[in-house]
Image: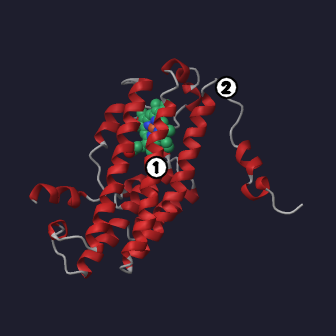
């Protein structure tokens, strides 16, 4: 037999990745995280392409990639509703098996931040990173980010203050700037939904990753990939 649905998609390998749940809700927890990692993978793939397209002034093509990432982020935001069907008591039945494991250790999430323009080199000294994760993060730390590509495109267009982009009428550059803002906003929404989901599950308890928990996550809510696009609104 040639290619089948299962052989092409490697369904058996995929389904073997979820072990027998030790408590009823553990399967939901694992599927939610694993599906996030898959969508993060796609978002990174699109982000790389969008960054190279912006670097060669191919803005409409870059936007098709960025719009896909925004849509991906929006459906990840919607996934928090599924987590809301887990009770805090249901979570506590298996929370101990995580030991010190936490979403804070997601290398792909950090890759997304690095690739978008928020780079924190100190994250590379994290002891939980595998050699492959470290190599990917180092590559992204060194490579131009989406924000770098945008800033260089502005410079090529002779724009020294992004305020001029906001003041200008519709153009390929102004439309790109709005799509970048959509992306920044979508990630912001994801961060908000995450902290609400966390408070709903564990209240103000510290995280398994060792942070203060919701208090730490609240401190990340103001993170922006394109702060100048937000700040220019005040000056407009
Ligand atoms: C019951 C569900 C969840 C709880 C209670 C929870 C809790 C937390 C807490 C407390 C932190 C702060 C670090 C720590 O001390 O552990 C954190 C960070 C993080 N979590 Fe979750 N989380 C949940 C679900 C998820 C899911 C489904 C994802 C999807 C991948 C995720 C991704 C992340 C990421 C990326 C960070 C780092 C955020 C940053 O540093 O900006 N979490 N989580």
Residue with the most extreme right position: 1
Count of numbered marks: 2
Q: How packed is label 2: few (under 14 Cα within 10 Å), some, or many (20 or more)?
A: few
Indicate the position of residue 85 as horizontal and vertical percent values: 51, 26
The relative height of residue 38 versus residue 179 in the rendered view (above or below) is above
For this rendering, which residue is in front, 32 or 95? 32
For the point 45% across and 53% down, the residue is: 71
The relative height of residue 168 versus residue 33 in the rendered view (above or below) is below
Asked if residue 5 lies left or right of residue 60, the reply is right
Asked if residue 98 lies left or right of residue 140, the reply is right
Which quarter is ligand 1 in?
A: top left
Q: Which colour scheme is used?
A: secondary structure
For the point 36% across and 59% down, the residue is: 119
Q: Can see residue 152?
A: no
Indicate the position of residue 104 as horizontal and vertical percent values: 45, 43
Asked if residue 194 lies left or right of residue 185, the reply is right
The residue wearing badge 2 is: 22
First of labels 2, 1 by sequence position: 2
Q: Mark 1: which secondary structure?
A: loop
Q: Quadrant of the N terminus?
A: bottom right
Asked if residue 147 lies left or right of residue 42, the reply is left
The relative height of residue 139 versus residue 154 in the rendered view (above or below) is above
Indicate the position of residue 20 as horizontal and vertical percent values: 72, 31
Q: Which mark is residue 126?
A: 1
Q: Mark 2: which secondary structure?
A: loop
Q: Nearer the viewer, mark 2 or mark 1?
A: 2
Q: Can see residue 182?
A: yes
For this rendering, which residue is in front, 228 or 142? 228
For this rendering, which residue is in front, 169 or 209? 169
Quarter-of-image position of residue 27: top right
């Amino acid at each position: 037999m040639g290619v089948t649905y299962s052989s092409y998609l490697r369904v058996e390998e995929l389904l073997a990745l979820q072990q027998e749940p030790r408590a009823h809700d553990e399967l939901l927890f694992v599927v939610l995280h694993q599906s996030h990692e898959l969508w993060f993978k796609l978002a990174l793939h699109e982000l790389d392409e969008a960054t190279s397209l912006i670097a060669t002034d191919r803005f409409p093509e870059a936007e098709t990639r960025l719009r896909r990432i925004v849509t991906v982020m929006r459906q990840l935001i919607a996934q928090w509703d599924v987590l809301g069907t887990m009770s805090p008591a249901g979570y506590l039945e298996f929370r101990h098996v995580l030991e010190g494991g936490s979403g804070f250790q997601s290398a792909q999430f950090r890759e997304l931040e690095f690739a978008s323009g928020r780079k924190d080199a100190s994250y590379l000294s994290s002891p939980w990173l595998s050699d492959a994760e470290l190599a990917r993060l180092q590559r992204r730390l060194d490579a131009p980010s989406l924000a770098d590509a945008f800033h260089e495109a502005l410079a090529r267009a002779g724009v020294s203050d992004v305020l001029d982009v906001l003041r200008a009428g519709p153009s390929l550059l102004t439309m790109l700037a709005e799509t970048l803002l959509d992306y920044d906003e979508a990630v912001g929404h994801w961060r908000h939904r995450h902290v609400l989901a966390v408070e709903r599950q564990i209240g103000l308890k510290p995280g398994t990753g060792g942070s203060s928990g919701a208090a730490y996550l609240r401190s990340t809510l103001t993170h922006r990939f394109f702060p100048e696009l937000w700040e220019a609104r005040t000056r407009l």
